[in-house]
Image: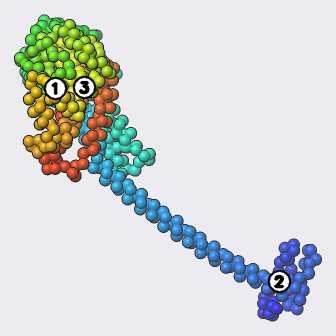
């Protein structure tokens, strides 16, 4: 029975049948619902109502406790996940900063940045913009790879690096075209404040070519072997007169003329390239001194045996090793060049070959790569190269074969296969670094050749091959663990890196 105090506090209850309100007084034992007519015991209803209220309070308290537990667990999980993510990002950033890819990216960014400001000073706006854009992409790539900037998409830094690298040849092409203001030529090319000045007396090879009508412009290269000069404020009539003066000077050997472009040699072997850009009133003059040749003896090594022995014994050997031979051969007519290329193809250099009137490149089934170019004026260029492993196998075969002079090849092979070179550098590490440097030598030579008048469309295939070779070279380079290098290997690593950096900076000027 509910006590009287509890009953006095209650004035109304809810009907269990219809939910209507039940009004009661202190003396009432029964309650009748005025809506449905149901009759109920007041004391029982009071006891049941109190139990429900207590149970609801307990249920709500339990829910509150469980909710708090779940929130605490979720917070702990979020904290743990953030901690794990931060640790992973720090580890990835450390690995990236130590990688060769990171170092190459930042090196190219610096080179392109310096080149951008350099070509801006030469009034080549478009080329400068492309250079700076390449530098920006490469810097962003590095910052994302180092986790300084968060990537919105995984490996976005790799995509940005590829874009930055692709912009490198575009900047060279734009520099070669020499974009300028076409809508306001007078303002851009007649103001002395915007055009550099040079002195003809300072040109080292001035005696070989006529003096142009203007001394306003920019000297890109001025040595005893090569001249690269932009002369501004040259009218079409002045260009025609200068071309006539060059012909009078003797530049009519193997002459080629294509629109406002003219290429020829003189009797002494100097090569002249003229490129007149009428829209900018600008004449680009390039002059190369003849290659100094001498009597040579063609190598008898294993790599030399892969190609026919050249007929000429006059030339200049630029490089000779077990993995590469590079040489110029003079006294070689165009007909002799064509015949030599045919012999090379007969000896197996017919895989992935590319041949035009003056250039030939191919590989053979053994993995050797060959380039043979006709430089003009009776000069032929030969370059054959192979990777270190194939060269070692070829040298071993040469040692076992009955050759007249096996001692020379054996000595060369022994020197290559020795565990450590005379300076303490291990043979395998030296081969990797030499291959790395050789790639950049070839790439720089390719870019210089392009600047000297190569066809962008014709050289696109070669450029794509260089990009594939770049990936292969960098894979080998990435495999080098700097922390495990010996003192001699580490010193050689720094030496090669310094040389490559200097070559890239020089090529970018």
Residue 368, numbered circle:
3
Q: Nearer the viewer, mark 2 or mark 1?
A: 1
Tell me which residue sits at (10%, 27%) in the image: 406
Q: In terms of sequence position, does the residue under pointer 2 or pointer 1 come before the other?
A: 2
Residue reaching furthest to the left: 295
Element at label 1 = loop
Tell me the quadrant of the picture where the C terminus can be found: top left
Residue 45, numbered circle:
2
235 and 207: which is toward the camera: 207
Tell me which residue sits at (16%, 38%) in the image: 417
Q: How far from the left and from the top, in percent, is residue 481?
A: 24, 48
User: Is residue 480 found left or right of 223 in the rendered image?
Assistant: right
Q: CA distance from mark 3 to mark 1?
A: 20 Å
Tell me which residue sits at (21%, 39%) in the image: 432
- Give the labeled residue for mark 1: 401
Q: In terms of sequence position, does the residue under pointer 2 or pointer 3 come before the other?
A: 2
129 and 41: which is toward the camera: 41
Residue 330, numbered circle:
none
Element at label 2 = helix
Tell me the quadrant of the picture where the N terminus can be found: bottom right
Quarter-of-image position of residue 331: top left
């Amino acid at each position: 029975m509910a006590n009287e105090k509890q009953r006095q506090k209650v004035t109304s209850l809810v009907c269990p049948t219809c939910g209507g309100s039940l009004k009661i007084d202190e003396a009432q034992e029964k309650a009748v619902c005025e809506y449905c007519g149901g009759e109920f015991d007041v004391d029982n209803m009071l006891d049941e109502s109190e139990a429900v209220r207590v149970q609801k309070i307990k249920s709500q308290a339990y829910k509150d406790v469980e909710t708090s537990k779940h929130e605490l667990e979720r917070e702990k999980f979020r904290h743990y996940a953030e901690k794990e993510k931060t640790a992973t990002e720090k580890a990835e950033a450390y690995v990236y900063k130590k990688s060769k890819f990171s170092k190459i990216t930042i090196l190219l960014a610096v080179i392109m940045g310096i080149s951008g400001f350099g070509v801006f000073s030469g009034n080549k706006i478009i080329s400068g913009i492309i250079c700076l854009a390449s530098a920006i992409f490469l810097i962003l790539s590095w910052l994302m790879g180092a986790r300084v900037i968060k990537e919105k998409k995984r490996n976005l830094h790799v995509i940005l690096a590829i874009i930055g690298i692709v912009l490198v040849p575009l900047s060279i092409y734009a520099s070669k075209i020499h974009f300028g203001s076409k809508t306001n030529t007078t303002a851009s090319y007649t103001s002395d404040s915007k055009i550099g000045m040079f002195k003809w007396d300072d040109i080292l090879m001035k005696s070989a070519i006529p003096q142009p009508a203007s001394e306003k412009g920019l000297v890109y290269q001025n040595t005893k072997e090569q001249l690269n000069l932009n002369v501004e404020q040259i009218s079409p009539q002045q260009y025609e007169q200068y071309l006539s003066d060059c012909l009078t000077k003797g530049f009519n050997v193997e002459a080629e003329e294509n629109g406002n472009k003219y290429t020829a040699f003189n009797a002494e072997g100097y090569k002249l390239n003229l490129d007149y850009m009428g829209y900018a009133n600008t004449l680009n003059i390039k002059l190369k001194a003849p290659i100094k040749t001498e009597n040579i003896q063609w190598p008898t090594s294993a790599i030399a045996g892969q190609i026919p022995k050249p007929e000429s014994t006059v030339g200049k050997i630029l490089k000779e090793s077990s993995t590469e031979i590079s040489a110029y051969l003079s006294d070689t007519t165009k007909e002799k060049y064509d015949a030599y290329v045919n012999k090379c193809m007969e000896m197996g250099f017919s895989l992935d070959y590319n041949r035009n009137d003056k250039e030939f490149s191919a590989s053979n089934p053994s993995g050797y790569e060959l380039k043979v170019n006709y430089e003009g004026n009776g000069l032929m260029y030969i370059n054959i190269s192979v990777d270190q492993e194939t060269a070692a196998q070829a040298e071993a075969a040469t040692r076992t074969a009955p050759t007249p002079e096996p001692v020379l090849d054996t000595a060369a092979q022994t020197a290559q296969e020795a565990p450590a070179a005379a300076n303490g550098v291990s043979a395998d590490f030296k081969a990797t670094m030499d291959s790395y440097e050789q790639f950049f030598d070839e790439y720089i030579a390719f870019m210089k050749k392009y600047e000297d008048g190569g066809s962008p469309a014709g050289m696109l295939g070669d450029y794509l091959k260089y990009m594939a070779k770049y990936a292969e070279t960098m894979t080998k380079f990435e495999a080098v663990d700097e922390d495990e290098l010996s003192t001699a290997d580490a010193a050689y690593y720094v030496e090669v890196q310094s040389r490559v950096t200097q070559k890239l900076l020089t090529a970018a000027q």
